[in-house]
Image (spheres, helix red, strand yellow):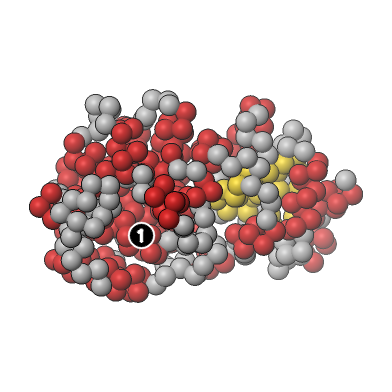
Amino acid sequence: MQKARTIQKAASGDGGARATEAARPLVQVLADSSGKLSGVCAILEEKFTVAGERLDADAKLAQLPDAIVVRAELRDVDTIAAIKKRAGKFAKARKRIFLLEHASHVGVSQAYALGATLVLPGPVNRIQLLAALSDPRDDAAAAPAGATQPDNAVETAATAIASMFMSVTLGQPLDVDGTREAGRQIADRITQHGLSEWLTTVRRHHEGTYQHCLLVTGVAIDFGLSLGVGRADLERLYTAAMFHDIGKARIPLAILDKPGRLDPEERAMIETHPAAGYDFLKGHDKISPEILDAVRHHHEYLDGSGYPDALCAENIGDIVRILTISDIFAALIEHRHYKPTMPRNEAYNILCGMNGKLEKALVNSFKQVALTR
């Protein structure tokens, strides 16, 4: 393991070695075997200063890395325990990427519960990994003023979503109160610091379905605040937003995270998620009828062209109408490593062009959320 020893020397406080790498971000790689460790380190060495450690060894890295990459089997309790032992320093790294060999909702949920900011399932893809890392320090430089608030609300919400997906996958009890509390923390965060700060922070920390749920919740909260909805309605709105895509836990990851266009069969599978989420939640006494309605109908349109029930305007409630606009907007402005992020003004123009599908007065009111807040 000569390569690993060289890597450790560069990160352990050797002033000369570190000085020559000053322009390169430090990435720590953690793995549960020497083979996995050397494979990931070999990919990253061309662009980063790399510190590699096996999870079954004592933690040695003294300085805080810019990013952490973990490649390990999360079905092993000793591996999970080793990751948790490093939780203090782990949580301080801006990017925490987990590489999972086995693509499953349980594995992805476990990774996020352990603090991942991005999960890449399947064989290690060099291009994808390097793109996901980019320069871990660029995000801070690109963030707008005021976007350096603590990320407790993000981590609490991501953990709640991970718990939610794991409950669906494993048939475990659902923590409704924890999910609602996470939504409340997001509402407090946005009330204090605004939507733009939330969007920047979430994009920096998460990708895929988890990012989407966090973005939708933030957008829906800001929309509700701009409309002046009451406290009880705001709570219903952010709880519905947190739960709205819970049915995606029933969709295979290969379809859910597919970067290209879905074929008709895959699209039909995706369109089962509102009803699947509704079916899972309807037996919980802490889930109100309004939230169940929003989970089932957030893809319905006023002209009856939505799914799963092809509802028309008179049958679509106010919370659903607000959530639908928030959901579409959030999907348009999501950050994906394989495509540019759509500017907010372009996303709003798309909403304006959905004539007959969305309530025009609400779309007009949404302008201040989309463009100025």
Q: Which residue is mark 1?
A: 330
Report the amino acid beneath label 1. Ala
Mark 1 Cα-neighbour bin, 10 Å: few <14, some 14–19, many ≥20: many
Is residue 190 visible to us here? no
Q: Compare residues 121 and 35 and report the one nearer the observer.
A: 121
Q: Is residue 80 above or below residue 360?
A: above
Residue 319 in percent (x, y) is at 19, 49
**321 or 269: nearer the viewer:** 269
Q: Is residue 44 left or right of residue 90?
A: right
Q: Is residue 67 left or right of residue 341?
A: right
Residue lying at 68% horizontally and 56% vertically, measured from the top left: 125
The quadrant the C terminus occupies is bottom left
Tell me: residue 14, above or below residue 233. Answer: below
Pick whichever, 265 or 291, lies toward us.
265
Residue found at x 13% / y 55%? 313
- Position of residue 255 relative to residue 204, above or below, is above
Spot occupied by residue 129 in the image (x, y as percentages of width and height): 65, 57
| Residue 344 locus on image (x, y percent) | 35, 70
